[in-house]
Image (cartoon, grey):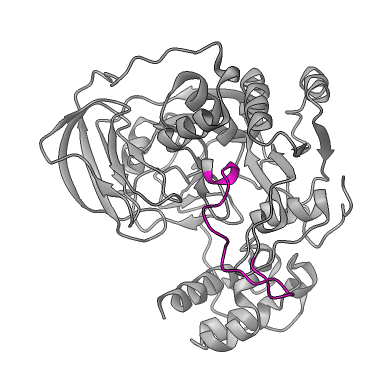
Amino acid sequence: MGLKKSFSGVSLPPQKVSNPAIEDTPLPKRVVLPLDQACKPVVEVGEQVKTGQLVGRSDDFLVAPVHASISGRVTDIRPWFDPRGSEPLSVIIESDGNDAWQEELHSDESFLEKERGQILRDLKAAGVVAIGPPAMPLHAKFAEPERPKPFLFLVGIPRAKPVDTVIINGIDAEPGMAAKGAVLQKNSSDILAGIKIVQKLLDSAQFVFAAGSNGSLNAPLTSELAGLGVKVFQGKDKYPLGLNPILIKCVTGREIPLPDGSEQDIGVAVVDAVSLLHLVEAVRDLKPQVDKVVSLSGAGMTAVKNFRVRLGTVVQDLIEHLAGLKGEPVKVIAGGAMTGAALMSTNIPITKETEALIFQTAMEAKRFSPDACINCGLCVRHCPSRLLPNELSKYCEFSMFEEAKDKYLLHCIECGICAYVCPEKRPMLHLMRFGKRELSLA
């Protein structure tokens, strides 16, 4: 393990984390639950639903079902903006204040004795989504592919490679994120149980636990991992080690065949620590994913804090309940400080893909410069994907999208280092995301 520990990147300032506690936010008065395009609602307006009840499902293997995160009445089913800027059909539920579950949760102490097929069915029914990029239903990482991917390798033969390496990602990738470290410290027994479940699903794979320098990997947990035959990869404190493409390269020496390939194409499955916790809850407790551990920071908060938030909670409602904000946020970033995207409104719900929220006051919010690129080459020197971000961003800025594609725009992993090191403070990540979106709509 660890064939390549050096890579192009940057050392970021250390972040302050208040403590490893994970606080529960108050039950929201309403939730907005976005549905995937292939996901159809199975409830009607006016219907009373209970927490954990199925409200949206799809026959597509790669689409996770959606469950009610509170009990109450369905007040509307209509398009609603999500954090990505899309406007998917969404189920809006008004809370009855009771949080009555459809089925009472109870732990099955013999959950490790379940057959592989039953584990996958429980996981799929729970709708657990693994954080990407790209985000995908967790069961899809472990199930045999239904059909070979239409990706042609250099020899021109389509193939589906079995998973031979599982990487448990315990690294909080960037400033503003601290959920993985909190889960490792407070739910270490669940993490170990999750590894045992995945080992049963992929019994022939080798397992690697990737840890950062946040102190979350203590001696007892290290000893337990060794007892399960899990190797530990201690990464350097350098960004973007926590992003899946770079982590895979550093741990295995393999590269994801971008732009159309995925980790499955090279026989690797990456599972982050938070998703592993939801996996255990799905298999042991038969609990659907109705909440998410989200890191919150900014707006006068002295440190990053972690909260367990019900899915579909609108950001504005969360702000009203959140104690510790010492100023009115004028900008909310969904995600970390490097890869996050500013929300167009606080009337946007938290989804399964939301890892962090950064609230910025007028004094904290920064504006990008409209100045032209000076071709200093800093972005090229630090790009972990070995691209030319200066040229790609200029192509996208002037709507030359096909030219950007020819220069490997789609190989960008969107780490944000180019914008971070740019002395002119050009919005290069924003421009390249814009270019990718325009190409996807062409």
Q: Magenta segment: does it hold 1? A: no
For the residue pair 358 and 35, the one nearer the viewer reads as 35
Give the image location of residue 114, x and y in percent: 55, 21
Q: In this orientation, which residue lies closer to the viewer: 142 or 135?
A: 142
In the image shown, does 300 or 38 lie closer to the viewer?
38
Q: Is residue 148 above or below residue 333?
A: below
Horizontal and vertical percent for residue 196?
Answer: 67, 25
Q: Main secondary structure of the magenta part?
A: loop
**Above or below: residue 329 compared with residue 219:** below
Residue 147 locus on image (x, y percent): 53, 58
- Identified at 69% across, 31% down, the residue is 199
Q: Is residue 394 left or right of residue 54?
A: right
- Confirm whether residue 252 shows in the render: yes
Q: Is residue 214 above or below residue 109?
A: below
User: Where residue 226 sits: x, y (%)?
Assistant: 83, 24
**Residue displayed at 29% across by 28% down:** 70
Query: Which quarter shows the C terminus?
Result: bottom left
Q: Quadrant of residue 92?
A: top left
Q: Is residue 168 above or below residue 376?
A: above
Q: Is residue 152 magenta?
A: yes
Task: Look at the image and tell me in which quarter the N terminus lies.
Answer: top right
Taking the spot 61% from the left edge, 56% from the top edge, the residue there is: 338
Total marks drawn?
A: 0
Q: Give the camera-side residue of 112 and 406.
A: 112
Residue 211 seen by the camera: no
Which quadrant of the figure has residue 320? top left
Q: Which residues are magenta?
A: 140-158
Which residue appears at 66% of the width and 45% of the height?
Answer: 270
